[in-house]
Image (spheres, coloured by chain):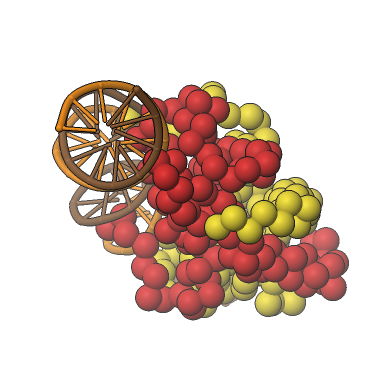
Chain colours: A red, B yellow, C brown, D orange
Amino acid sequence: MGATKTEIFTPKQNQIAIMAKALGHPARIAIIDYLLKVDTCICGDIVNEIKLAQPTISQHLKELKNAGIIKGNISGTAICYCIDEKALQTFQKYFNNMETKLEKKKLNCC
Amino acid sequence: MGATKTEIFTPKQNQIAIMAKALGHPARIAIIDYLLKVDTCICGDIVNEIKLAQPTISQHLKELKNAGIIKGNISGTAICYCIDEKALQTFQKYFNNMETKLEKKKLNCC
DNA sequence: AATATATATCGTAATATTGCAATATATAAA
DNA sequence: TTTATATATTGCAATATTACGATATATATT
C-alpha cells in the first residue's frame, strides 16, 4: 500500500488534509514565515534564508503551490510568491469552527 | 535521503509542522470530525465509521496522540479519546496570527 | 478458568517524501 | 549573441508513510 484512500472521505476532509499535509514540513512553515516577514513578496532569497539546496526549496514551493497555499507570478527572471489569503482562510475557518464546537462541549473527560 | 532536516529550523517551526503533518491525512481529519460530532468521547466506534481496518485506525490514533492533538484514557476495555484543546489552540493561534499579519500587509501583488 | 470484546503491536508490501547533484529553461545584462 | 542569474525539472538514493493480516494484550462476562 502506501497510498492514501481518498475515496472513502468527504471532499472537505480531503481538502483540509491536503492543505495540512503541505504545511506539515518545517521548511514549508519556514517559507510561509519568511513570506510574512518580508515586505515585498519577491522571494528568490528564500534559498539564502533556509539552509537547503535550491532544488529542494523549489520542490517545497511547488508543493505549497499545488496545495493552493501560495501563488506565484513570473516577474522577470525572479518569481513573485505570496500567500493565497483565501485558501488560508478556508483552513483557518475549519480550525476556528473546531474550537467553537469544543468550547460548547466542555467535556473534560480526558 | 527521505528524512526531514529538523536541525535547521526553529522549535516553533518544527512544532507547527509536526501538528500539521499529523492533520495531513483525511482519515485523521475524519477522526477529529467524529470526535467533535459524538457527544461522548469514547470512540471505539470510529472503526465502524471509517472504512479502514482496525489496525490502520489504531495507527492513525497513535499519530494524532504523538503529535499531541488528542489524548487517550483507558476506560475499561474501551479507550476514551478526546481532542487536546490546548494543543489545538497553539496551532490555531499560529494561523490566526498569520491572518493578522496578512491583513496588515494587503500587498495583493499576486 | 474460559470466552468474548476492544485495542495495540508486529511484520511487511506498496507507495510517497525528502534532499541533492546534474541539468534544463528562460529572462537580463553585457 | 554570449554570459550571468534565477528558477524548474530530472533522476536517484535514503527514508517515511499507508494499509492490513496476524497476533498480542488486557479487561469484562459467563
**Left or right position of A67 against B106:** left
Query: Which quadrant: the C terminus of chain B?
Result: bottom right
* Residue at x 37%, y 75% (from the top left corner): A7
* Residue at x 73%, y 51% (from the top left corner): B105
Say whether residue A93 is visible. Answer: yes
* Residue at x 37%, y 62% (from the top left corner): A4
From this view, report whether residue B109 is shown above or below residue A44.
Answer: below
Say whether residue A29 is visible. Answer: no
From this view, report whether residue A4 is shown above or below residue D9.
Answer: below
From this view, report whether residue B59 is shown above or below residue A9.
Answer: above
**Left or right position of B100 against B108:** right
Query: Which quadrant: the N terminus of chain B?
Result: top left
* Residue at x 79%, y 62% (from the top left corner): A109
Q: Position of residue D5 (x, y in %)?
A: 39, 28
Q: Where is residue D21 in the image (x, y as percent from the top left)?
A: 27, 62
Closer to the camera in the image, A18 or B39: A18
Give the total number of marks visible in the rendering. Answer: 0
User: Dividing the picture into quarters, in which one does residue A41 lie?
Assistant: top right
Closer to the camera in the image, B75 or C27: C27
Q: Where is residue A90 in the image (x, y as percent from the top left)?
A: 63, 68
Closer to the camera in the image, B44 or B69: B69
**Left or right position of B7 against B52:** right
Closer to the camera in the image, A76 or B69: A76
Q: Where is residue C17 in the image (x, y as percent from the top left)?
A: 38, 46
